[in-house]
Structures are given as structure tokens and as C-alpha cells.
Image (cartoon, rainbow, N blue to C red):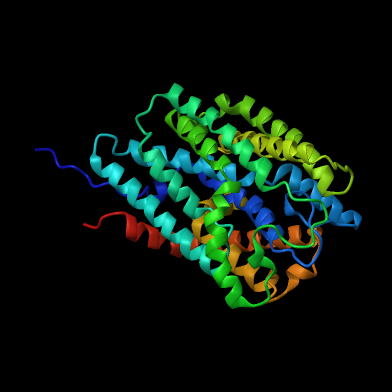
Amino acid sequence: MVAVERLGPVEQGARQLAPDLARGIMLALIAVANSAIYLYGRPYGIRQHIIEHGWADRLASAVSMTVVDARAYPMFAALFGYGFVHIWNRRRDDAEGRRVLRRRSWWLLAFGAVHATLLFSGDVLGLYGLVGLVLVRLLRVRDRTLLVLAGCWLVPVALSSALVYSTPEGTAQRSYFWSFAVEDPLTALALRPLEWVATPLGLLGVGTAALAGVWAGRRELLSSPDRLRRAALWGPLIGAAGGLPVGLIAAGALTVHDPVMVMALNAVHVVTGIAGGLGYAALIGVLAGRIGQRRGPVVTALAACGQRSLTCYLLQSVVFVALLSPYAGGLGGRLGSAATVALGLFTWAGTVLVAEVMRRAGARGPAEALLRRLVYPRG
């Protein structure tokens, strides 16, 4: 009888550069997107982005809404689906593969619940856990069916985006994510689980992106940069074109009063954001192909951050709560968009340095180590 090797996590030496590099860079976009949610105490405009008046803040609003908002999480979701296939391929004929993927998805859901309750109600770990439970049932679905499902899912994505984010211009109070503007920490603690449960309504686009990631994972596209060039070009261009109107509105350079038009622009913003996120992943795949084995210290550190993306993602929330929340540092009530973007990028850079220190010490991220211990059987 041939011994069957147990399914385990991918060891460091077997990892591909492109997915880790993409996750490491993607966390910069996540930091910019998430830090903006903490701003409070001022009127809100489109997609509940604060209304700015200074030219630097207006420029930061335009850029972040055009190339970051609704573009970072689809990229993360595509990488999630891509990695899902890699885990499955290592044990395609073993029922334990499905058990591991289900167990991993349930634990991601649990991680998300804790993260959302204690720190950040806009958490997506739980949503990715739910997506993972669905993907387990679709692992043997044909490619054509997978792409049809991804395309059909864009309909509820567009409808939810049009309805959820279409709040009146200049609204003084938040229409969602109330906990970010609450001064009492216990009240904020009570609100966060409720907000987290509603978060998927505004992030349905991760479903299409994850399915696209599964399709790409079956073809090992991130290992074939020549096949990614068109996506690397057109994806970001489509994302930027679709995000520009909302970016101009957020910056005060364009005014739209018709509520139907606002709903349509929100829908286009989110749908094209999926293309933008997939394009970013493809662009980094092309970059990783050109780098090859010639990895300098910057690429090595970014990849180390990507290998510890769960830990770095959680660390960002710790920093943002400590500095920006009204019951802690309170900077969210004083900083403008430009300073908040800078803070987000500095926070991300700090997590990259932390990840590099861990790499040099031969240590996994603590969140990754805990997830590994919970998901993979011992022995």
C-alpha cells in the first residue's frame, strides 16, 4: 500500500513570488481604503466620503476614490480564489482537501467575527470565509460555468452598490458604519457586530473576483506573465475610467444632483472596480515575472508582508483604532484625506518592516501560525 501524505500548508521554499508580492502591495491599498472610513465629524459626500475643501485633501480624495476605493478588496478576493485552487490541487483526489478548505473557511469566518467586534466592523475576513464555503462546492464546476456565474453575479453587485452607497450629498450623520463616529467605546463595541453583518451588502463584488481568481488559478496565470499583459493593461484602465466620475465628485470638481445618476455612477464605480482589482493582480504578476529570481531587499520585504498578510491586515486595524477612533487618539476628527492617506501608507510600511523582521528571524506571522494550527491536522 502506498502511504498517503497529509495535506499541509505550503512551505516557504515552495511559494511563488507573484501571489505574495501582490498581497504585500495590495495591503497598501487596503490601508488607504480602510483609514478613510475612520474620518468623522464632518459632512459626508458620495460613498460616505467626507467632503473636503483644501486642494491637497481634494486631490487625495480624487485619487483614492478613482484607483483605490472598491478596487483593493476585489484584488484580495481574486488572490483568495487563486490560492484556494492551489490548496485544492495539492489534494484533488482526497476528501481531506475539501475538509481542510471548509475548516479554513470556517476559521476565517471566526477570525473575522473577532476582528469586527473588537476593532473594525468593515472586516472582510468573515466574508472571504463565506465565499470559501461556496467555492468548495464549485471546485469541480467547468470553467465556462464558473465564468457565467461570475458574470451573472455582477447584476446583484450593481444593484446593491447603487442602493447602499447612494446617500444624499452633505449628510451630517453616517448612514452606516456608525461606530466609527461614536465616542463611547462600549457603544461602539455593541454596534460593530451589527455593522459587520451588513458589510457584505456593500462588498458583493468579491464574489465575482473570487470566481475569476479560481478560473485564473486553474491556469496558473500568475506564473505565466506573458498571458497577463492584456489584463495588466486594460484592467487598471477600466478601473480608473469607471472610478473617475466618483473621484471627481468626491473632490468637489463635479456635481451631480440627480439621485438616479448617483446610483448609476455608484454601480459603475463598483463593477469597474472588479476589473481594476483583477488588473492590479495581473500587473503585479507581470512585474513578478520580470523580477524572476533577481529579488532585491524591497521585493523580498514586500513578499514577506504578503506571506504574513493576515497578521499585517490585523495590525493595520490596531494602529487605526489607536490613532483615529474618537475614544482613543481622536485623529479621525481632525485629519484630512491627504494626511489620512499618508498615515495609511506609513502604517502599511511599518507592517512591511515588521514582516521583514519576522522573515529574517524565520518566524511566521502570529495570525498565520494560529490559523495553521487550527486548520491543518497534526501528526
Left or right? Give the position of 215 relative to 267: left
Check the image and report above or below for 309 versus 264: below
Residue at the spot 68% in from the left edge and 37% down from the top edge: 267
**Quarter occupied by the C terminus:** bottom left
> Which residue appears at 66% of the width and 47% of the height?
164
Residue depicted at x 56% and y 54%? 198
The image quarter containing residue 188 is bottom right
Q: Position of residue 80 (x, y in %)?
A: 48, 44
Decide which of 336, 27 is in the foreground and name it: 336
Q: Is residue 244 visible?
A: no
Q: Quadrant of residue 247?
A: top right
Q: Position of residue 4 (x, y in %)?
A: 18, 42
Q: Is residue 37 left or right of residue 120?
A: right
Q: Identify the image quadrant of the N terminus.
A: top left
Q: Residue 275: image x %, image y %?
A: 63, 33
Residue 59 appearing in the image:
yes
In this view, the residue in front, 170 or 318, is 170
Q: Nearer the viewer, residue 55 or 298?
A: 55
